[in-house]
Image (tube, coloured by chain):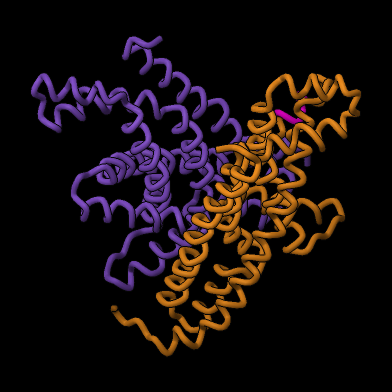
Amino acid sequence: MFDWKWEFAWEILPRLVVATGNTLLAAGAGYAIALVLGLFLAIAQRSPSRALTFVVRELVEFIRSTPLLLQIFFVFYVGPQFGIRLSPWMSGMIAIGLHYACYLSEVYRGGIDSVPKGQWEAAIALNMTTLQKYCRVIIPQAIPSALSGMGNYLVGIFKDTPMLSVIGVAELIHTANAIGSEHYRFLEPYTMVGILFLAISLPAAGLIRLMEGRVRRKMGLK
Amino acid sequence: MNIFDFVAQYWPRLLAGTGMTVAQFFLATLLGVTVALVMGLMKLSPNRLVRATAVTYIEIFRGTSLLVQLYWIFFVLPLFGVSIDKFTAGYVAVGMNIGAYGAELVRGGILSVPKGQWEAALAINMSPAQRMRRVILPQALVNMLPPWGNLMIELLKGTALVSLISVADLMFETKQINGSTFLSAQAFGAALVTYYILARFMVTPFMRWLEAYMARKMGRA
């Protein structure tokens, strides 16, 4: 290839591998937040209180239709204006976690809606509390149909972590930028970042499909 | 300074930025839809080489992130002698990225057209191009429009990334204003609301209208 320097590529590989670790950590932590928060957002939209349902619904729509990049800046810069200082990691995780929580809440909502009405009635008939009803009856049955969406967003959050570079989280793109400006060479770092992303996201997508099939079989669905 | 004073003072720059965002959005849509159609059709081709090309394209653009693609197109392509200005690099990256996602929708839409339609077109002796243009694609289009609505929102959000290669879009202007005034809540808040208005009151209603219009045209209303 044009001017591709293998020695340089080898030299920067260790730094990029460390950065890959950070990217995975950011994706994992963000996803964990999104998984939990998303569930609350989904259940809140089924609450008997019309006001709560409305507010949560609009909030989810708002966050889903505005750019994540802007939300990251918002969380990072608006806090200090009111005396709340957040580290780049902290604000990054809040922004990306909240953004994906909204996506996941839609996935959960679809899953919850797919649970037959008889199951809800049966849970009420057995005199279960709301908590028991969700934990023991509804959510376990909602998860299988939500799995494929959940998997897609896991890969999605991984691919969105480069945006965290703008507030200084030392993930892949941030490291590649730093390497590029130290050595005035952008070909190798950016190309390697692209390859690293492919090398992770393609197998991950395959693995997720495989797991999805297994969970579905375990739950006794085709 | 409250948000109204802020907007009253900075509206020319916010408006200019919004204009750039809209321009990037339209150009990226044009490119994205074209790429999606070509790649979606190529993925259904009987020729293995053509199919492999489409699969490679789709997997590369869906497997890496938009920001990586944008930086690669803007910073690395010039090293291969292909220099493009930031404005073009911006919508090209966003359009090519969305095109890869759209290709899957096109493929799905075409496959969802009932088999009888293909056979009927064959029976009345249409050429493959006629069959695709007159019979299959119009029906596929109606089937795939609803997921395209979501994709258009993703596209709009994707255009915010072009600010990172200094295209003066809404995101970029907002960041500049924030940098010189430190009115973060007002600046980013105004931008969030603007993006929301574009998505919720322009893109989504247009896609709904298009869905209804196409369905009517196809006699399915």
Q: Is residue B58 above or below residue B32?
A: below
Q: Which chain is orange?
A: A
Q: Is residue B187 visible?
A: no
Residue A54 position by quadrant = top right
- Kindly identify the residue that appears in the image at 51 percent across and 83 percent down: A12
- Where residue B102 sits, quadrant-wise, is top left
Asked whether residue A58 is in view, the answer is: yes
Image quadrant in which the N terminus of chain A is located: bottom left
Q: Residue A52 vs residue B121: left or right? A: right
Residue B84 drawn at (x, y percent): 33, 60
Instruction: Give coordinates of residue B135: x percent, y percent.
Output: 22, 23
Magenta stretch holds residue B33: no
Image quadrant where residue B122 sits: top left
Q: Is residue A210 above or below residue A144?
A: below
Task: Tell me the quarter of the image containing the C terminus of chain A.
Answer: top right
What residue is shown at x 71% (from left), y 20% (from top)? Answer: A117
Judge from the rendering whether residue A178 lies leftward or rightward of residue B19; answer left or right. right
**Chain letter tied to purple:** B
Viewer-closest of A45 and B150: A45
Q: Main secondary structure of the magenta part?
A: helix
> Which residue is painted at 53% across and 53% down in the image?
A210
> Which residue occupies 41% across, 50% down?
B97
Q: Position of residue B131 (x, y in %)?
A: 17, 27
Q: How many marks?
A: 0
Question: In front here: B117 or A90?
Answer: B117
Task: Give x and y (percent) for residue A177.
Answer: 53, 72
Q: Residues in magenta?
A: A53-57
Image position of A163 with respect to B106: above or below: below
> Which sits in the foreground, B10 or B122?
B122
